[in-house]
Amino acid sequence: MAKHTKLKQENLGYLLGTYVLLIGILLFLLFPLYWVLNTSFKTNMEAYRYPPTFFPHQPTGASFIKLFLQHNQFFVYYRNNFIVSAAVAVLSCFVAIFTGYSLARFKNWWNKAIFATLLVSQMFPVISRMISLYVIMGKLGIINTHFGLVFALLAAQAPFCIILMAGFYANIPKEIEEAAMIDGSGRWKTLLSIVTPLVKSGLLAVGIYAFLMTWDDYLHAATLIQTDNLRTLSVGIALRYLGELSYDWSFVNAISIIGTIPVVLVFFFFQKYMVKGLVAGAVKG
Amino acid sequence: MKALSQSRRNLFFSIILDVPALVLAVSFIIIPIIDSVIKSFQEFGVRNIISGKPGVWNDFANYLYLSKTNAFSMATATTFSFVFTVIIIQFIVSLALALILNTNVRGARFFRSVMMAPWVVPTVISALIWMWIFQPQYGLLKYLVRLVSFGAVTDFAILNSPKTALSGVVVAALWKQIPLMSLLLLAGLQNVPEEIVEAAMIDGAGKIRRFFSVTLPYLSPVIKVSISMSIIENFKQFPLFWTMTGGGPNNATTTLAVLSYREAFVSMNLGTGAAITTLWMLFMIIVIFFYNKLFRIQDLG
């Protein structure tokens, strides 16, 4: 009997410890997000109150209104970021369909070498590439263009996309293709209209991954883009709103929210595919 | 004969399919990497960019310059201590979170979904979020430190002191990266066969024993992949440093990424910048080599 209560107490302590730990970690992950929301809805006067207030006493959307009405340049960066991220996402899918399939189906020495190269390429520092691309792309006249930026970024995202996609193709039984070929379907038709539709959800994961990673880019745009009107979000924010406006923290927090909303929406809307894709890539690959 | 031509046709088809990726990899990764290694042995600055003249071999002057000042060795030490600290803490916290969410804690599914939010926040914005929390006059952290220390410490500004600035960036890096590692480890935990855990339980293995002799070995491939992803990401980390501290104060947060960027794109000494990234690449190769070796030994054991 005594032993029984002791066991129960031990379990209770364990359970309590678990919850404390869980709440602690979740507070660390989620409270900063609340803090951004909280600050963005304060007046700038209140944002500068010390000790800080834990919810806005006079909630106001003034910072957002200011951003929408007075800061057109922010939306130029925003639009550029959309254009570049969407282009990289679509092109990544395109490359991942072909090369991913090839790597999964044809295990010859050639493809093994490509697979190894793609894996290793992830390791190299971006700055090392940028030092050279800055000069080469300058000579080719594609520096300071979205075209050049998109291809430099595509090369950075494509390796992981291809490896991920190869994993999805590898799960499709070969018999399906062989049956289609016997029925007279050519190689290209088999790939594009029979096999690829079966990995649609994987392709979606790849596209979203490329979109999220490109949305986050800083280094490529910082080195390859010099014209303000061509700048993307991260560099635009860092250059324009950190220097001159870093004293208006309510406004900076409003920028943080508007800059994050698209990716949060994309992620939570497609979370099911995204999580499956990432897990498949890392756990199996 | 037919079999041979079939395999040849397969090779041909696969080469065609590989062309887009190959063109991309060669022109935007392989050539630039080789070119920057070459540049590291050259005098290459603004003049070369403007005039379009190729760089000139300068008898290892870039490397000699790095060995003369202690900026490079300090940046190397800072980079390694950043990567090491982030990975150790990240692994422990992520594993704890994954283990908790893998039990039938109330709300586990909901938490699993919302915990991913920091991961999607763009890096520069996560830097802004933490800069505001760390703000020296009105920041939340200053207030919390005052509360916890019962008013003893009233002017805590983590990013402003060379002693603590690196930990400030570590916190921001952890915040963004813990979600993904937890997600991957959680997926790995769900692949651990329940029968074996139960069998160990029946055999009288305690919680801790079960964790080390059953769960951990099954989890080891996932651990290997997620830590190597983390090593690569943190070695490369640039925007967090550049936005939060710019490498300061007093170069306390100048990592190899910050140093090479500053040398190449602020001072416009592309040759010296390339020398830094070349050595940095060598470090990466060595680290990944030993890392793989470590896990191979563990796999054998």
Image (tube, rainbow, N blue to C red):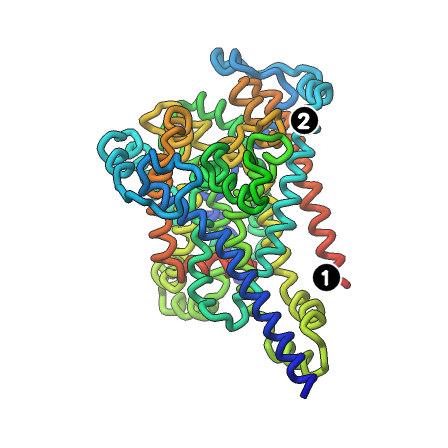
- Whether residues under marks 1 and 2 lie with C-beta atoms below 8 angstroms apart, the answer is no
In which quarter of the view is residue B267 placed?
Answer: top right
Question: Which chain is home to disc 2?
Answer: B
- Mark 2 is on which residue type? Phe
Q: Are marks 1 and 2 on the same chain?
A: yes
Disc 2 element: helix
In which quarter of the view is residue B7 placed?
Answer: bottom right
Choose mark 1 or mark 2, whichever is in front: 2
Q: Position of residue B261 (x, y in %)?
A: 55, 26
The residue depicted at 70 percent of the width and 46 percent of the height is B289
The residue depicted at 67 percent of the width and 79 percent of the height is A6
Residue at mark 1 to residue at mark 2: CA–CA distance: 36 Å
User: Does B130 sit above or below residue A9?
Assistant: above
- Depth check, front residue: A31 or B197: A31
User: Does A6 sit above or below residue B255?
Assistant: below
Pick whichever of labels 1 and 2 is earlier in the sequence.
2
- Depth check, front residue: A88 or B234: B234
**What residue is pinned by disc 1?**
B299
Left or right of residue A115, residue A210 in this image:
left
Left or right of residue A32, residue A3 in this image:
right
**What residue is pinned by disc 2?**
B72
The residue depicted at 69 percent of the width and 78 percent of the height is B200
Disc 1 element: helix
User: Does B125 sit above or below residue A197?
Assistant: above
- Depth check, front residue: B92 or A247: A247
Q: Position of residue B249 (x, y in %)?
A: 59, 27
Left or right of residue A125, residue A203 in this image:
left
- Mark 1 is on which residue type? Asp
Q: Is residue A91 visible?
A: no
